[in-house]
């Protein structure tokens, strides 16, 4: 199966003030040294300030690909080092946005499952100092993926990222973010009817594409 490498494991460095109702954001992530424990809600030593939007079991971790970070480094004229996208995992050789929904990754002792795309917000834009960032990030579609934790344990920079399962429906995170076609929604619905676990956000997107009540 496909294999890549984990370049960095990133945890919150500092909580930053925001203008929203939460009052703070944990988007400022920096690489950790040595092994880091992964539990059902993410990394030991990390937090999500708003688990309604960025956390919980289905969004325990956020992964971003080095290849996409390199694209943005060139576009923005600055280094987009690990953690700069608020990601927990910076990976190389694995296209996070092109991962199939339900795909499973083994990293070190840990087994993760691809769940849904990241939706950019104004806190992300303010953190980067890019006023039109939400529009640009959305238009480019290099969004990375959230992951749930199927088996916890330790991970560290340098671990292999091995895709151990890829669902046959083939619907990717990028396709979901762009908006499902009726045909893609049908394949995803068939997988769901067959027992695949889809997050509430994905089920809502599926319903919109099929124009049926969620």
Image (spheres, rainbow, N blue to C red):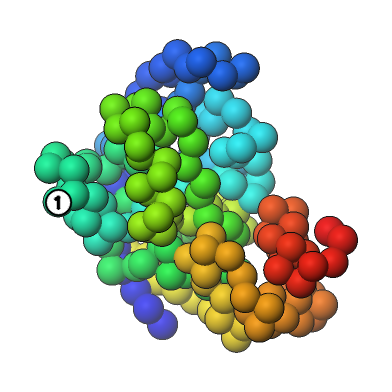
Say which residue appears at 27% left-offset and 43% top-offset. 82
x and y, in percent, of residue 84 in the image: 30, 38
Residue 134 visible, this angle: yes
Say which residue appears at 64% left-offset and 50% top-offset. 58
Say which residue appears at 38% left-offset and 48% top-offset. 137
Return the residue at label 1.
74
Q: Label 1: how many residues lie within 10 Å, few (<14), some (14-19) or many (20+)?
A: few
Q: Nearer the viewer, residue 186 or 153?
A: 186
x and y, in percent, of residue 122 in the image: 46, 31
Q: Quadrant of residue 140?
A: bottom left
Q: Quadrant of residue 163?
A: bottom left
- Above or below, 18 against 77 in this view is above
Q: Residue furthest right?
A: 213
Q: Quadrant of residue 31?
A: top left
Residue 91 visible, this angle: no
- Please state if 120 lies on the left or on the right of 133 as rendered: right
x and y, in percent, of residue 168 in the image: 60, 86
Q: Nearer the viewer, residue 62 or 171?
A: 171
Label 1 sits on a secondary structure element that is helix
């Amino acid at each position: 199966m496909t294999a890549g490498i984990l370049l960095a494991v990133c945890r919150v460095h500092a909580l930053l003030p925001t203008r929203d109702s939460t009052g703070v954001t944990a988007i400022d992530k920096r690489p950790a040294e040595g092994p880091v424990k992964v539990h059902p809600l993410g990394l030991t030593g990390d937090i999500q300030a708003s688990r309604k939007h960025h956390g919980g079991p289905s969004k325990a971790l956020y992964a971003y690909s080095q290849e996409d970070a390199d694209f943005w480094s060139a576009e923005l004229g600055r280094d987009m080092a690990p953690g700069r996208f608020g990601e927990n995992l910076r990976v190389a050789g694995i296209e996070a946005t092109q991962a199939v929904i339900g795909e499973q990754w083994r990293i070190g002792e840990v087994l993760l499952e691809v769940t849904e795309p990241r939706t950019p917000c104004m806190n992300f834009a303010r953190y980067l100092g890019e006023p039109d960032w939400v529009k640009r990030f959305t238009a480019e579609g290099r969004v990375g993926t959230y992951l749930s934790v199927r088996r916890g344990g330790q991970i560290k920079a340098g671990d292999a990222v091995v895709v151990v399962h890829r669902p046959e429906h083939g619907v990717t995170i990028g396709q979901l973010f762009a908006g499902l076609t009726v045909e893609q929604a049908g394949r995803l619905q068939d997988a769901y009817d067959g027992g695949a676990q889809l997050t509430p956000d994905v089920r809502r997107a599926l319903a919109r594409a099929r124009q049926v009540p969620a």
